[in-house]
Image: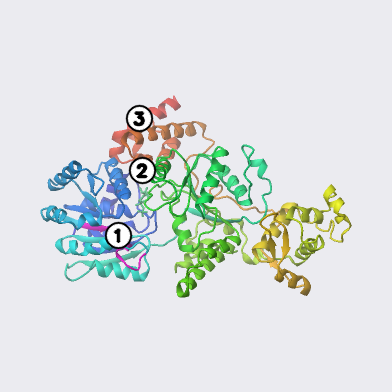
Amino acid sequence: MQCNFSEKSLISLLKKHFGYKSFRPGQLQVIESVLSGNDTLAVMPTGGGKSLCCQIPALVFKGITIVVSPLIALMQDQVSQLEEAGIDALFLNSSLTLDQYSLNTSLIRGGKVKLVYCAPETLVTERMQQLLANVQVSLITIDEAHCISEWGHDFRPEYRMIASVRAQHPEAVCLALTATATQTVRNDIKRSLKLGSKAYGFGFNEFVSTFNRPNIFLEVKSKAGQPQNVHKILKKPTSFKLSRADELLLEFLQEHKNESGIIYCFSRKQVDELTEFLQEQDYKALPYHAGLPDSERAENQRLFVQDETPIIVATLAFGMGINKPNVRFVVHYDMPKSLEQYYQEIGRAGRDGENAHALLLYSYADTNKIRFFMQDKTGTELAAAEKQLEAMNAFAQSRTCRRSLLLAHFGELLEESEKAEPDLCCDICASGLNIEETETDVTIPVQKLLSAILRTGEKFGASYVIDVLLGSRQKRILDYGHHKLSVFGIGTEFSKQDWYQLVNLLIDAGFLRKSSDYQVLSLTQDAKDTLRDRGEVRLPFVPHTNTPAQTQKPGKTGSRKHILNSSDIKGMAILEALKEMRRKLAREAEVPPYVIFGDRTLQDIAAKKPVALSQLTDIYGIGEVKADRYGDAIISIVRQHCM
Ligand code: ADP
């Protein structure tokens, strides 16, 4: 199966049907390989744009393209999106009624569709085989192809049977797509599907894209210690006992107003409590975990996907099969147990290629929680889990570029030239401080702090000890007579906030312990030894009192600016009206809003303000069919605001 095509003709198909001007990295090579009649294995990260790799060839090939997909929700999504783009596609799976199923099979028989999505178990049925026996099949695509391998993490035995179907359609070229594949899994996919086998006479190409997701800013913040000014950012008084993590989360959410995101927690209880607190503080948030009734879980997921509720608080059960491209942030309220899990979860952000933010709230104490659940493991399994946890910890505590570290974990070397702007990369790069610059000699302040804790009898929390160091004459200190101690008032070189930072660093470094009830600080043996030996202590301590450079937030100064400027008042009003229109259309069509238009498309319209249909061709993500279908409504909204 070989086809005539040129790069130009493929780009014009892309523009005509999907409204995009250029291919994402790797897409063109994969498409060209398939169209030249080569079996192809493509490994691309989530959001890399795998779907188009089979959809564009499907438009060129004469026969139909079959796409095997493991999840009904994903199939529905893909088919809705194709229908919106005016491409004939349908799915066959167990969610259809008998009538719908027969209608779809007759459309296939009549040559009325270009793409057929189906579950692997549907594909291998006798009935399906009979149907396909009389149809020309040009391309068989296996989505989530790692499911074919017993070494992959979601092995699906039915996937193994796809090979026999392939044998019945020797004329069809085969494309395997996956986001996660080690060399072992890749070999397994190739062998199982007989990719490039002489039996079929096709060549074989393999493409492995970078795992880098340059649009996701990576940030880690220490949640150890006490909240500092949380009352200032509360919208309402609360009876919840708040932690530093809550404070950091609220600060983060204030900076991400009206954005959609996921907050991952360690336990169901944590999910419930945090959701309740956020709701109390007037955030539109819903919980998601395996302990909720099925109906409630499905409804919460639906509301999130439909953009009705922007925030979902979840355990790691959430995310599989969710195709929502405009997730703008992922917060880890607790540390994941491995970098694999972390990568997969942050990967749910920014699938549309727009800026997204991944924030990990870290404390060394999370390690103990994770270890507690490793108790039932033994031998090599336990050793593997320990190693994963260690890698996760090292990432969280790293003082060098987090992106490079994450990619190195997956065996990829990120060249300096491939890095995004520092302020779009990670917190370390954005701060402009690398390890050599940040690890400073803190021996003297640490001695002062540890002595103050010892001299006050290891009976007080950080706030009190710091007040002693700062020479506060509050009643409590005078009552205890602590104003007479030699450590009283010897720490005025730093602010209270800086001393807190040092306390947190010492907790993370295992020098200080904090009791869980009254948050009382005490010294570990390491700290006592260091104090006694007057050993040098170096920590990534960055006092605010004397650092002019503050961490910059992503997107504020970077080259990848938002298309729409927030000072464009008219544009912002148009954007709101467009979002409302999209919600309404999505409700009517019973599809998620992103199926109608992506966020970037709405922003592009609001920024460019087209007032004539002809101007729509210039808008990102609007192909011919969408322009026909929604052009008048869009123009009318823009005109209302501009006239
Ligand atoms: P994957 O399956 O690899 O996770 P998708 O195929 O779902 O990714 O693509 C993610 C998003 O990127 C979708 O919203 C899709 O429309 C968009 N996209 C894909 N290719 C392009 C492109 N060439 N230009 C712009 N957007 C694209």
How far apart are labels 3 and 1 at the CA level? 36 Å
The residue where tag 2 is placed is: 621
> Is the residue marked by circle 1 packed among few (<14), some (14-19), or many (20+) residues within 10 Å?
many
Q: Identify the residue at the far right of this view.
A: 484
Residue 189 marker: none
Whether residue 97 sits left or right of residue 470 in the image: it is left
The residue where tag 3 is placed is: 633
Q: Which numbered disc, 2 or 3, marks the residue that appears first in the sequence?
A: 2
Identify the amino acid type marked 1: Val
Helix or strand or loop: what does disc 2 sit on?
Answer: loop
- Quarter of the picture containing the N terminus is bottom left
How far apart are labels 1 and 2 at the CA level? 21 Å
Is 364 a magenta residue?
no
* Viewer-side residue, 233 vs 50: 233
Residue 105 spot, x, y in % from top left:
16, 47
Q: Which numbered disc, 3 or 1, marks the residue that appears first in the sequence?
A: 1
How far apart are labels 2 and 3 at the CA level? 16 Å
Q: Identify the residue at the far left of this view.
A: 134
Highlighted range, magenta: 139-152
Count all numbered tags in the image, as a single digit: 3
Identify the amino acid type marked 3: Ala
The residue where tag 1 is placed is: 30
Residue appearing at x 31%, y 59% in the figure: 177
Q: Is mark 2 within 8 Å of ligand 1?
A: yes
